[in-house]
Image (spheres, rainbow, N blue to C red):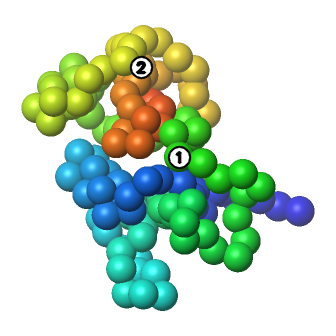
Amino acid sequence: MKIKRVDHLVLTVTDIARAIRFYHEVFDMPIINFNAQGEPNCVRCGHQLLEFQTTDRLPKLTAAQPTSSSAAICIVSGDKPEDVCNHLKSYYIPIIAGPVEQVGSEGKMTAIYIHDCDQNLIEIASYKDR
């Protein structure tokens, strides 16, 4: 088997519209998909998708125990860490930790941690050479 990349992640949230608004407004992720009811349920994050579901409207195939506020994901920014901090402050989003040095899939990076609107942990990484 030759795995090439992650295509999409699904986050269980309490309110899909609120989650889409958060990721679209704060991170400028385009809204690109619609569910069977014609409502947005997905944003693009680079070459991957972030899909959203709620526990009261789960698809047939899902994790064993989907719940909101249980995810921890890392997204990569092309901005300097200080610019990321200033951007988050402009949206009144509290920084939980950081900037701190970490190691990611591409080597050393600087990470800043926040919670999204459902209390999922979001790590925002900046690589020095990217």
Is residue 29 positioned above or below 109 on the image? below
Q: Is residue 73 visible?
A: no
Q: Residue at x 36, y 74 (%)?
A: 40
Name the N-terminal-most of marks 1 and 2: 1
Could you tell me the amino acid type at mark 2? Thr
Q: Position of residue 90 (x, y in %)?
A: 10, 32
Direction left: furthest residue: 90
Q: Position of residue 123 (x, y in %)?
A: 45, 30
Q: Residue at x 37, y 18 (%)?
A: 96
Question: Mark 2 packing: few (<14 Cα in 10 Å), some, or many (20+)?
Answer: many
Could you tell me the amino acid type at mark 1? Ser
**For the residue labelled by badge 2, is the local secondary structure a helix, a strand or a loop?**
strand
* Viewer-side residue, 18 vs 2: 18
* Viewer-side residue, 60 vs 100: 60
Labelled disc at residue 68? 1
Q: Residue at x 52, y 17 (%)?
A: 102
Q: Position of residue 121 (x, y in %)?
A: 47, 32
Q: Nearer the viewer, mark 1 or mark 2?
A: 1
| Disc 2 target residue | 110
Q: Looking at the image, how many numbered discs can be counted on the residues?
A: 2
Q: Position of residue 89 (x, y in %)?
A: 15, 26
Q: Residue at x 37, y 39 (%)?
A: 116
